[in-house]
């Protein structure tokens, strides 16, 4: 006789676990199903964890979670072939509790986080693939797994099965992605001794640095790269939309190799030992890509609901928050004993009133703007680098003349009117 | 326990159907060195039914003394009967060191004996030495997945015992002029008291991989990249009539069955020619093949440790080199009415 | 029929790395798993139970997180599991390990008499294969190592028929029960666990015993104190000189190699391509 749970959560990433944890804490009978060998085994993220959303779930989590380093410095690089314009902020207020954000290794962090859900009473099952949702009379009533006697039933199924959510596609909640809606991110963990990291990034032991890289890191394609410091390793990665990749006939590892060998990056990673290589799809379509998130007996959370802010590189915090909101809706639905779409739509409402959808709304045009007008990456970044070089080179020319010269060269290259148009468009996209 | 009561180096002479296992001769060779270093006699001990005649051979291979227990109940190896004999001998004559071959029976016997004698036992040793001053056996073996060696000591218990990998130690050339002492012992064993019976012994030569007896082995490693590329290993082996082996990685990736694994946890081999292709040369692999006569290594990485044990090395891409080798061998072949010979 | 399977949690040696500078184990990325041979031991117990009925108990010794391998065993089909965990057991070699496990088995046996003990052939982190026979000696039951088939279990006669692997071939052994088997990987294929087992395992809370839960324990035989062997030193063996690296283009190197090999051409049996 197959078992029936209150909730089945598919996928033990940040979204699924946050949802399972919250449901279990509220006394619901929760089954959390993970396809990997353990939670985190198949997850990739740049590796920055924002504090607030996790703290909502686990107060003062930093005292026990397997975090790498609190981030005390965030740098942004505008990179050209042999130069970089760097700006950023470093503040010691981020080096003390409650901190701002952290670098994490997902393989460790996700395991710990899922363990919290287990401690709250959720049942975690690994190495099990959910092959489909069981639908009866238009309502999702459970899931079928790839195991013998693999059917399990529940009042609500929470889909947290990642960006390429086959289950929400099966339910017709969203269509196949367009290649410009997803970014392909490739990432490598590079082992490097602690002292070397501290020296190269000017850090103390329990301090971390993140570098977000725009420009030549992606060979002029739409996308960004990153370099984060863990305790004794670096996360280096680069992401670009699938469409740029196809257009430029690029292979993901070529992009990563290019980045690692870039003269501005190479000295930071030199001598490291490659520990892991991962590739992953990340939804970057913004608000336009968000599918239907609630149905009869089913809700969709996290990457599966395409909740990622491509500009600010936030994903795990949105995932956790969406998991929490979904859990709250499920708990209410349970009280009412009504798991219909109408009942579960309280999740949709909460989501659209939260920072998540508001942020996605704000940046909804950004990716498209940059995709459509490649000059931002292909022309302005090199231009800015040339300008900076001119400005900082001491050659006897007065600074005022240099400024004039710079402006003249910029407008000469693209024409005054077009520069103004471009600037306006970019400002509109990210304002 | 007075440690000084224990003197002498002993070797378990494993016999099947009246034939001594090769590893026992190897251990007599290694035991000889230890005994000379410690300035004590080397003894072999033999158990079985009608095996007295094997004592001379044991002496020829280096033993000064041979302890023999001959009894019908000992016809086939059984833990319960054999351990009784060994425990009796060890308690009576108090050797300081006992070595066993790391064969299924040798390991089985040593584990049981060690438990009853409450003494230390080191498994699957690949290096043996002795600290003369402290009279300690230094038994070393690959540890932690095989990239490092650990020396195991047993300081306060005697006898110090170890099982030793077959084909790692070198046997002495037999000298049938050597003289030695044969000591016969009797113990009481009753078949009706035995709780296990050997009903049948099946010598299944086909099931056993032909690796152990192969003259030429082509071994592929993870450096072959994928299962499809690994077919080149099979093709080369087939062309030259060699057996195929693989590293632990290859077996775990499912490219080859377990029986074809070479190394610490697989087969130990000593062919005339050993090809190591795309094999990095982790210690756990090397202990299983380093005594091969001629070792040819092909690897992309010039710093791969396999080149340290190779007689000849080629630094390069196996995908490029192996097909050329195959072609060269094929061109050597002439066929005359189905007969294949060298041109 | 009561079958006890002894299992161990081991670092996954496929992934394990040694820090070349300090020669120590890099445990950062090595996940802990159920020793693969022990998984086959549990699976064999499940196969036997299908024919005979009865109970499968798993027993493990290790740190508290080793409950994971007991849960894994429940997934495969065990009914219940005991974890022996206590600082007093720490640092045990094979002799002290078999002592502690045999004391736990004594207690299990008092509660429900044991007919069969099954262990994996060896653990992949130690490769010794000594604990199984050690337990059998301490329980005074016959050990049968390197088992490749459990041919028959006769509950009336209290006997088993076993195929045991030899250096070449195998032998057929009949043994009284209780006895102890250590199994090779080829004895069975691990089945994909059904969903109800997975749920049962996720829910299962292993029985935890400390040294105080065992009776008549001689503490001098436990842990580091009870271990006659110690690790003297760890070392990377000296690299041998190495042979000659061939030089030149690929085809030149291949030609040189062929010249070397032709000295030994009698060893090759060139096969017909037809």
Image: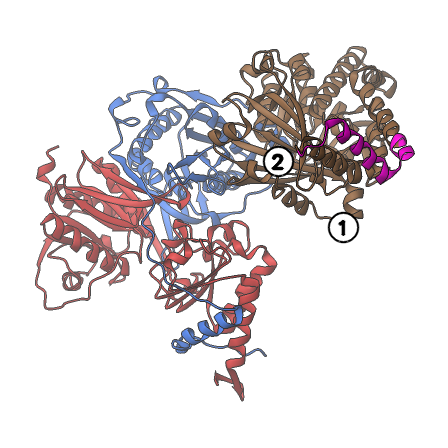
Chain colours: A brown, B red, C blue
Residue C68 percent coordinates (x, y) = 51, 28
> Can you see residue C165?
yes
Residue neighbourhood size for the residue with mark 2, other residues' Cα within 10 Å, grouped as few (<14), some (14–19), many (≥20): many
Residue under label 1, please give it.
A249
Badge 2 element: strand
Question: Which residue position is annotated with label 2?
Answer: A236
Q: Which region shows up in magenta?
A: A395-421
Residue A407 drawn in magenta: yes
Residue A11 location (% of width, % of height): 69, 29
Q: Which of the 4 image quarters holds residue A318? A: top right
Q: Quadrant of residue C121?
A: top left
- Spatial CA span between label 1 and label 2: 22 Å
Residue A48 image offset from top left, x and y in percent: 64, 25
Figure check: C89 above or below B274 = above
Residue C120 lies in the magenta-colored region: no
Q: Quadrant of residue A107?
A: top right
């Amino acid at each position: 006789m197959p078992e029936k749970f209150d909730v089945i959560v598919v996928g033990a990433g940040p979204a699924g676990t946050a949802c399972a944890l919250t449901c279990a804490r509220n006394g619901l009978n929760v089954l959390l199903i993970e396809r990997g060998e353990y939670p985190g085994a198949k997850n990739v993220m740049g590796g920055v964890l924002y504090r607030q959303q996790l703290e909502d779930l686990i107060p003062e989590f930093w005292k026990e979670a397997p975090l790498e380093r609190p981030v005390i410095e965030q740098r942004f690089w505008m990179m050209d072939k042999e130069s970089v314009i760097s700006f950023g902020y470093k503040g010691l207020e981020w080096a003390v509790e409650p901190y701002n954000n952290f670098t994490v290794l997902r393989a460790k962090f996700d395991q710990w986080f899922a363990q919290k859900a287990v401690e709250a009473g959720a049942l975690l099952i690994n190495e099990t693939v959910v092959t489909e949702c069981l639908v009866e009379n238009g309502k999702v009533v459970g899931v079928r797994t790839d195991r013998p006697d693999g059917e399990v039933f529940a009042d609500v199924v929470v889909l947290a099965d990642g960006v390429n959510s086959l289950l929400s596609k099966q339910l017709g909640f969203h269509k196949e992605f367009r290649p410009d809606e997803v970014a392909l991110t490739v990432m490598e963990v590079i082992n490097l001794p602690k002292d070397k990291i501290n020296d190269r990034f000017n850090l103390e032991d329990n301090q971390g640095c993140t570098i977000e890289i725009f420009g030549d890191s992606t060979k002029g394609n739409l996308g960004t790269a990153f370099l984060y410091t863990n305790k004794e390793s670096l996360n280096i990665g680069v992401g670009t939309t699938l469409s740029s990749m196809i257009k430029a006939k690029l292979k993901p590892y070529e992009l990563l190799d290019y980045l690692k060998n870039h003269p501005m990056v190479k000295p930071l990673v030199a001598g490291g030992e490659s520990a892991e290589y991962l590739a992953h799809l990340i939804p970057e379509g913004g608000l336009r890509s968000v599918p239907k998130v609630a149905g009869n007996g089913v809700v969709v959370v996290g990457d599966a609901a395409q909740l990622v802010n491509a500009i600010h590189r936030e994903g795990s915090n949105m995932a956790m928050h969406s998991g929490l909101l979904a859990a709250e809706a499920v708990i209410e639905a349970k009280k009412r004993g009504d798991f219909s779409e109408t009942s579960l739509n309280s999740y949709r409402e909460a989501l659209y009133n939260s920072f998540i959808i508001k942020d996605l709304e704000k940046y909804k045009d950004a990716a498209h703007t940059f995709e459509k007008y490649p000059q931002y990456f292909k022309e302005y970044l090199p231009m800015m680098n040339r300008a900076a070089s001119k400005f900082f080179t001491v050659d006897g020319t007065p600074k005022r003349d240099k400024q004039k010269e710079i402006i003249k060269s910029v407008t000469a290259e693209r024409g005054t009117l077009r520069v103004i148009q471009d600037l306006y468009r970019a400002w509109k996209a990210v304002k | 326990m007075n440690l000084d009561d224990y003197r002498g180096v002993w070797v378990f002479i494993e016999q099947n159907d009246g034939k001594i296992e090769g590893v026992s001769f190897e251990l007599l060779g290694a035991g000889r060195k230890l005994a000379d270093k410690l300035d004590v006699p080397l003894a072999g001990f033999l158990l079985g039914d009608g095996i007295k005649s094997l004592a001379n051979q044991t002496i020829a291979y280096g033993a000064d003394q041979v302890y023999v227990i001959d009894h019908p109940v000992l016809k086939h190896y059984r833990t319960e009967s054999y351990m009784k004999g060994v425990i009796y001998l060890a308690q009576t004559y108090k050797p300081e060191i006992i070595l066993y071959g790391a064969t299924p029976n040798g390991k089985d016997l040593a584990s049981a004996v060690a438990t009853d004698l409450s003494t230390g036992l080191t498994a699957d040793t690949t290096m043996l030495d002795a600290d003369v001053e402290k009279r300690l056996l230094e038994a070393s073996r690959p540890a932690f997945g095989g990239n490092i060696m650990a020396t195991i000591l047993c300081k306060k218990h005697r006898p110090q015992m170890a099982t030793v990998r077959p084909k790692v130690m070198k046997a002495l050339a037999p000298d049938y002029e050597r003289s030695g002492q044969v000591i016969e012992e009797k113990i009481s064993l009753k078949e009706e008291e035995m709780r296990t019976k050997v009903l049948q012994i099946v010598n299944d030569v086909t099931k056993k991989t032909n690796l152990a007896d192969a003259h030429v082995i082509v071994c592929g490693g993870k450096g072959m990249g994928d299962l499809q590329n690994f077919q080149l290993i099979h093709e080369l082996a087939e062309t030259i009539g060699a057996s195929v082996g693989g590293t632990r990685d290859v077996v775990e990736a499912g490219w080859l069955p377990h029986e074809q694994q070479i190394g610490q946890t697989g087969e130990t081999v000593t062919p005339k020619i050993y090809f190591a292709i795309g094999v990095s040369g982790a210690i756990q692999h090397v202990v299983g093949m380093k005594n091969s006569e001629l070792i040819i290594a092909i690897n992309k990485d010039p710093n791969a440790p396999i080149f340290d044990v190779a007689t000849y090395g080629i630094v390069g891409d196996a995908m490029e080199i192996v097909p050329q080798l195959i072609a060269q061998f094929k061109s050597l072949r002439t066929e005359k009415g189905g007969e294949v010979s060298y041109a | 029929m009561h079958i006890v399977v002894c299992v161990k949690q081991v670092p996954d040696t496929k992934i394990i790395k040694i820090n070349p500078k300090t020669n120590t184990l890099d445990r950062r990325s090595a996940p802990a798993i159920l020793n693969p041979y022990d998984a086959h031991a549990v699976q064999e117990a499940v196969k036997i139970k299908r024919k005979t009925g009865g109970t499968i108990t798993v027993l493990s010794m290790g740190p508290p997180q080793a409950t994971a391998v007991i849960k894994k065993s429940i997934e495969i089909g065990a009914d219940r599991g005991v974890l022996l965990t206590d600082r007093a057991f720490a640092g045990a070699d094979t002799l002290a390990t078999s002592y502690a496990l045999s004391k736990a088995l004594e207690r299990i046996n008092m509660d429900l008499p044991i007919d069969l003990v099954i262990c994996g052939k060896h653990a992949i982190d130690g490769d010794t294969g000594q604990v199984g026979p050690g337990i059998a000696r301490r329980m005074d039951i016959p050990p049968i190592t390197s088992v490749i088939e459990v041919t028959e279990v006769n509950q009336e006669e209290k006997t088993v028929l076993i195929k045991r692997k030899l250096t070449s071939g195998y032998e057929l052994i009949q043994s009284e029960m209780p006895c102890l088997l250590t199994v090779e990987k080829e004895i069975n294929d691990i089945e994909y666990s059904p969903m109800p087992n997975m749920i049962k395992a996720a829910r299962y809370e292993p029985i935890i015993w400390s040294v105080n839960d065992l009776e008549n324990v001689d503490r001098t035989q436990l842990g580091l104190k009870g271990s006659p062997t110690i690790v003297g030193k760890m070392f990377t063996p000296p690299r041998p000189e190495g042979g000659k690296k061939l030089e030149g283009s690929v085809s030149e190197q291949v030609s040189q190699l062929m010249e070397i090999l032709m000295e030994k051409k009698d060893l090759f049996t060139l096969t017909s391509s037809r």
